[in-house]
Amino acid sequence: MRAFCSLLSGGKDSTYALHKALDEGLAPACIGIVVPGRPDSWMFHRPFVEFVPLQLNAMGLSGLSYEIRVSGEKEKEVEELKESLARAKEVRAFDTLVIGGIASRYQLTRFGMVAEELGLRVYDPQWGMDPEAYMYELLRYGIIYVITQITTAGLPHRLLGVPVNSEGLVREIVELARKHGFHPAFEGGEAETFVIKAPRYSGGICLEARRVRVSEFEYKLEPISATLCDRPRVTIDGVMYEA
């Protein structure tokens, strides 16, 4: 049986990839939580990464957590990832690297290079999927997430923190992407996400946060609290949303 190390950012894509690896019967040996030192990392997701341990707790995988700190500087962070994974491989004994890329050649090339140099196979289950179909697949599969950051025109800040748990909301995002030209699954960094419910979660995650305007088209959620709970819900600026 193949053993894997999965890079988990807390977002929808890395969560889906981890779940699919488990569905395939691969054995989890390591869950790498990459923490970039800069918010504008070229490779790695930053918002809400501090709450990934809650997700691992919800999945019963806390004992596999492996923190990987990188500078967030272009290319340097790739070498730092390789060095951390090499250390992890010595003690966790895995032969597969699980990632959640959809269409970013920049990321796939660099993850592939790291994997090749370490003698690892890359498992990326959603690579090349139609992005609109993929957004509906996440809903069908049972992954519920919130948008934690918006950095593009055309994606309204009212969607920040609202659980994406209905076909209507997915359709709205897809139609906005068609109209305004951003990637419907946010692969270009137009938005970041955080998963509050997934098939392998026992219960879910309850969040409290506030919306903050950063610039004309950039908004973010500023977290106040995050806890495990039986039924996930999100409270944004005092308004509660059930997931």
Image: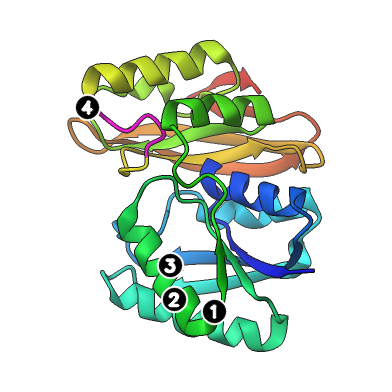
Quarter placement of the C terminus = top right
The span picked out in magenta is: 181-186
| Badge 4 amino acid | Ala
In the rendering, which numbered label is found on residue 66? none
User: Which residue is the site of mark 2?
Assistant: 114
Q: Residue 82 appears at what percent x and percent y?
A: 46, 80
Magenta highlight: main SS: loop
5 relative position to 113: left or right = right
The residue closer to the viewer here, 209 or 154, is 154
Label whose residue precedes the other's in the sequence (1 or 3): 1
User: Which residue is the site of mark 1?
Assistant: 85
| Badge 3 amino acid | Phe
| Badge 2 amino acid | Val
State yes or no: discs 1 and 2 in contact (Cβ < 8 Å).
yes
Label whose residue precedes the other's in the sequence (3 or 4): 3
User: Which residue is the site of mark 4?
Assistant: 153
Q: Residue 135 appears at what percent x and percent y?
A: 50, 28
Tell me, what colour scheme is on the image? rainbow
Where residue 210 sits, quadrant-wise, is: top left
Task: Look at the numbered disc 2 and give the secondary structure of its residue.
Answer: helix
